[in-house]
Image (cartoon, grey):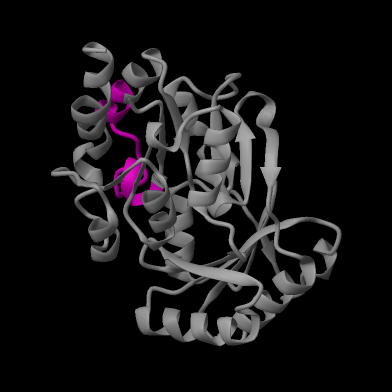
């Protein structure tokens, strides 16, 4: 039986406008009432989805968990207790940030455990962040030295220009590919994490902490930064709107898109029957 569901948020659990549907809320509450762990596994900082956890009845609950920054932080919901972090060494984070900011018309993000800093925010990034109510601090200068003593979880850049995304990724990886990994998300973000750190590794770390077998885990996603957890989980699920590479790697592909309550379909058809007949 599936005992842990790890789910991406944007374009997977949430509707395209950033809201959480009533059908998904109800299905997740049924699953957690049956004893299933529901774990957001997001590229975002954990504070930015506290409202989603509140809607699900999981906010600040002991024995419930969340994964943030593409696997760079694992936390217990109660008190936001940090169980594990995998930060990028400062010199590498600064180098990645400095390399990426040389590109025009690109938004530059640096995440610490509790703060998001943005330099040169683009209009498309501003609109997307506002739709998710993500708090951040604006940087007037492209200098990260003030963060030298702070663990940096990830560095990302935003542009909706796909060709430019890959140009920027190649430019950074040519210089720092031995130290970081790159993924893409939401059709706009180029994300850099510490080498070997990803959503899949974090999912397995948490499963081990909870003494769950890999076969008892499920991961649900839609984009390239979800690929590692879909491959790592006992059951990997892609929502109907997933990019082709993610759909091809999944064990299951939903009929429903994120805007059609794909998570409710997954839980009702592939998770709860094991509890009803177990």
Residue lying at 53% horizontally and 56% vertically, measured from the top left:
198
In the picture, measured across the screen, residue 48 lies left or right of residue 14, that is: right
Is residue 43 shown to the viewer in this render?
Answer: no
In the picture, measured across the screen, residue 75 lies left or right of residue 246, that is: right
138, above or below 263, in the image? below
Is residue 90 shown to the viewer in this render?
Answer: yes
Q: For the C terminus, which image quadrant?
A: top left
- Residue 177 magenta-drawn? no
Measured as percent of width and height from the top left, residue 115 is found at: 69, 51
- Residue 16 magenta-drawn? yes
Of 130 and 184, nearer the camera is 184
12, above or below 157, in the image? above
Residue lying at 55% horizontally and 30% vertically, measured from the top left:
65
Q: Quadrant of residue 269?
A: top left
Magenta span covers which residues?
Answer: 10-27
Measured as percent of width and height from the top left, residue 237 is found at: 28, 45
Measured as percent of width and height from the top left, residue 148 is found at: 84, 64
234, above or below 248, in the image? above
Residue lying at 30% horizontally and 59% vertically, measured from the top left:
246
Of 219 and 164, nearer the camera is 219
In the picture, measured across the screen, residue 27 lies left or right of residue 61, that is: left
What is the residue that sits farthest to the left in this orientation?
Answer: 255
Q: For the N terminus, which image quadrant?
A: top left
């Amino acid at each position: 039986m599936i005992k842990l569901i790890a789910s991406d948020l944007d374009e997977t659990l949430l509707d395209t406008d950033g809201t959480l549907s009533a059908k998904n809320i109800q299905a997740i509450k049924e699953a957690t009432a049956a004893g299933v762990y529901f774990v957001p596994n997001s590229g975002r900082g954990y504070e930015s989805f506290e409202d989603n956890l509140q809607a699900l009845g999981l906010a600040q609950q002991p024995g419930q968990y969340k994964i943030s920054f593409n696997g760079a932080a694992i936390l217990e919901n109660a008190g936001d207790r940090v169980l594990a972090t995998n930060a990028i060494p400062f010199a590498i984070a600064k180098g990645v940030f400095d390399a990426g900011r040389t590109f025009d018309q690109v938004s530059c993000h640096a995440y610490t455990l509790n703060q998001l800093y943005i330099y040169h925010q683009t209009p498309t990034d501003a609109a997307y962040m506002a739709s998710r109510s993500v708090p951040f601090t604006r940087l007037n200068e492209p200098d990260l030295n003030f963060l030298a003593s702070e663990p940096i979880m990830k560095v990302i850049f935003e542009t909706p220009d796909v060709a430019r995304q890959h140009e920027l990724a190649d430019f950074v990886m040519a210089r720092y590919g031995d130290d970081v990994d790159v993924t893409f998300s939401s059709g706009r973000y180029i994300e850099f994490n510490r080498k070997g750190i990803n959503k899949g590794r974090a999912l397995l770390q948490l499963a081990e902490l909870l003494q769950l077998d890999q076969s008892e885990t499920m991961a649900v996603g839609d984009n390239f930064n979800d690929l590692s957890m879909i491959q790592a989980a006992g059951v990997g699920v892609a929502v109907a709107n997933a990019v082709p590479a993610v759909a091809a790697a999944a064990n299951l592909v939903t009929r429903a898109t994120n805007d059609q309550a794909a998570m409710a379909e997954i839980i009702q058809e592939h998770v709860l029957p094991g509890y009803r007949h177990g």
